[in-house]
Amino acid sequence: MGDKQIIAAHSRAAVRARYAFIALVALSFLFAQSLYITALADKKKKPNYGHIKLSVKTVDPNGYEVLIDGNGAGRTTVSERLLKLDEGSHKVEIVFPNGERWIREFVVSGGRIYCIGLAYSERAIPIPAALPCPYPVNVSAPATANDGEVITFAADVAYKGQSALNYTWTVSPAGARIISGAGTPTIMVDTTGIGRQAVTAILVVDDGSGERTCRQVAQALTNITVNIPEPPKSRIYDQFEPPAFDDVKARLDNLAIELQNAPATQGHIIVYSGRRSRVGQADRLAARAKEYLTKDRGIDSSRLMVINGGYRESDYFELWLVPQGAEPPQATPTMQPSDAQPGSDNLRPRRSRRR
């Protein structure tokens, strides 16, 4: 019995050992299978980067600078270059010699290749000639002028074209009249009879091309004023102390000439008595002067006015020319009649020198 029990125990142990080996072999197989499957999965997994395949055809053997996201990435080549880029958005720039840039944004996916093929050749870009139109036009004129004066309106035209310009002027109001310069850059306008108005000159300039911008318009304005002439004024022609009547006659001769040259003018003679002159001296001297002018010089008495001016320190003459419409002169005595002191040596009249 004891031996049978021992044999049975050994048999059970052997069976357990065989099952353990089988389990170990199975686990090893499963691990190996797992590694194989993982390796296959790794082979099939998509990479996390892509490529840009770049080539630029050009006559420059040195190629052109390439920038990826603003960073230098070498230069272009005629043959294809393969640039590796991480997944995501990238900006590709190619800098050409004239400052131009070729710029594109790419969203790179893993495992994809983006091809760029460019052909570049330098070319001259023609610059069109500057057009002469529009061009500035300015018209100048005086700010004010008097009625009857001639106004000059002058145009300053900065035209750089080759065509001859046409100048067309119009002036207003209707009374204004162009007297010279029509069809030229400068005109002269007569303002006679305009009165208190403004004269406006409008200039149209065109080069005959028919282009709207080659037709320019400018204008200037001058205000017209009416000068009211000052009324005529009396003016003193001569003044003196009479030493003798012969000297007075010489001065009266000059007054007669002025009156003959101005038929509408009157002569006023103001005579003053001196402090110690005889009573009535001014009246006598004035009457004698008028008599000389009318009888000896032929002046109409209606054109002569004699005035007793009162008293001054000595006998005194004022000869005045009074235009038509002028205020007559006023006497300007320097003392009151009560201050006069007729002297005994002046009681006898003076004898005039014989002519």
Image (cartoon, helix red, strand yellow):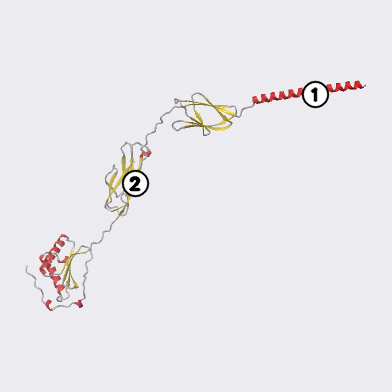
**Dot placed on the residue nearer the N-terminal end, 2 or 1:** 1
- How crowded is the residue under tag 1: few (<14 C-alpha within 10 Å), some, or many (20+)? few
- Mark 2 vs mark 1: give the one in front: 1
316 up-or-down from 112: above or below: below
Q: Quadrant of the C terminus?
A: bottom left
Nearest the eye: 24 or 297: 24
Residue 209: percent from the left, percent from the top? 35, 36
- Residue 136, by quadrant, is top left
As drawn, the label of residue 219 is: 2
Residue 149: percent from the left, percent from the top? 26, 52
Q: Residue furthest left?
A: 354
Amino acid type, callout 1: Ala
Q: CA distance from mark 2 to mark 1?
A: 118 Å
Could you tell whether 12 is left or right of 276 in the image? right
Q: Quadrant of the N terminus?
A: top right
Residue at image position (89%, 22%) is: 6
Element type where label 2 sits in the image: strand
Could you tell whether 346 is left or right of 26 in the image? left
Nearest the eye: 77 or 126: 77
Residue at image position (15%, 66%) is: 301
Nearest the eye: 350 or 120: 120
Could you tell whether 51 is left or right of 326 in the image? right
Q: Which residue is mark 1?
A: 20
Residue at image position (74%, 23%) is: 28
Residue 202: percent from the left, percent from the top? 33, 46
Amino acid type, callout 2: Gln
167 up-or-down from 253: above or below: above
Element type where label 1 sits in the image: helix
283 up-or-down from 131: above or below: below
